[in-house]
Image (spheres, rainbow, N blue to C red):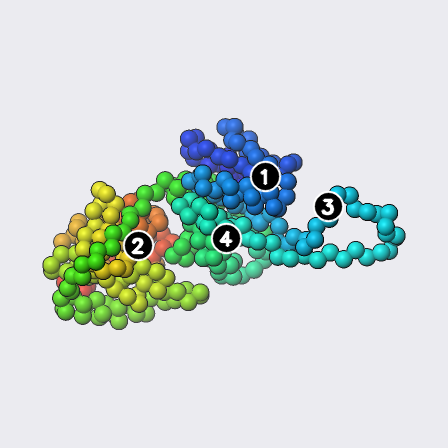
Amino acid sequence: MAELADRLKFVDPNVEITYLTAKGMKVPSTNNPTILYHDGFDDYRYQVKYLAPEFDAVILGAAVANLIPMNPLKGKFPSHNYKVGDRIPIDFTIAPRIIDEVKLVAPKTHLFGFKLLSGVPHEELISAAYGVLLESKATAVFANDAKDLMHKYAVTKERGVHPMDIGEMAYFIVETIKDEYYRTILSEKLDTVDLDSLQKFIALKKQFADSFKPVPEGYVFGTIAVRLPSGGFITTGRGKRELDSWLLVREVIHRERIVITSGMKKASLNAPLLDWLFRRHPDVYAIVHTHQLNLWQDEFPYAPPGTVRDSQRDIDKSFSIKNHGAFYLLDKNLMPML
């Protein structure tokens, strides 16, 4: 973690770092970060929760303890009451997982965690990291194997898996913290959707059904959007089973980073990018986004869905996003524009 802190400073010298650790541990060596010390699990837990709301991001390197004694002894062990060979029973309990408590006290703060296993199959490692992400509501969790610490994988909310070394990890964290997100305004006004557009939406869902495969945790990710003759577009709802619902996006105001929907549901996080593509390409009638990659498509860098960095892409044909998925731009005949 000390090396990561140094690399964060290298990526952006303006980053202000507060480093919480135990006494005697290695600390960052550059640019005079604020160093704080804790004296055990309870103190560490208190300080993390106290400090978290003050920061743009919290990075938790590992659990301080998985087990803690149920009845800790205060003071010196009374060795005079025992003789050689005596057994001293100690009851342990599972320690609270601090990463699960950060978003409770700092809901707007970016949260990055780590999941370390040893010698397990790759998919088991990724699934374990994704489980931590879901339970803690983290921005990303870095999965690594104790037998191969040089290679890490950033697991993101849409279950993207991004291989990276520690230097790339620092860039990933800094870029993510700086990202600007769109927000949604829910309009109570219910606009009508023409039957032809709705039928094409349903037809696309069936046509691309084989491309919408559930991840091992059972969620289905992906997006379908159809341009409406009256303006706006219909697309899938937000969530880990986005294809289960649809709604109308009335307008996206990019300069203010606002998505306006018809009704009381939030649209897919991809809505700003969908709108951007529709605006730039009047001949695009529909867009299908799957989380299956296609190597024959042009590939562009990853950015978190719903951010300015992800949404305003200057692209004129179907494309892929690295370690994320494919976007098919379709004409009026619902044929991909290649």
Q: Are marks 2 and 1 in contact (CB under 8 Å)?
A: no
Q: Is residue 46 left or right of residue 175?
A: right
- Provide residue 223's location: percent of width, then percent of height: 28, 61
Marks 4 and 2, how far apart in space? 24 Å
Callout 3 crowding tier (Cα within 10 Å): few <14, some 14–19, many ≥20: few
Quadrant of the image for the C terminus?
bottom left
What numbered label is drawn on residue 269? 2
Q: Secondary structure at mark 3?
A: loop
N-term-proximal mark, 2 vs 1? 1
Q: Which-is-in-front pick, marks 4 and 1?
A: 4
Name the residue tied to disc 3. Answer: 74
Q: Is residue 149 left or right of residue 137?
A: right
| Residue drawn 27% across the image and 62% down it | 236
- Provide residue 198's location: percent of width, then percent of height: 18, 67
**Callout 4, which amino acid?**
Asp
**Callout 3, which amino acid?**
Lys
Above or below 37: residue 70: below
Q: Which-is-in-front pick, marks 3 and 1?
A: 3
Name the residue tied to disc 4. Answer: 100
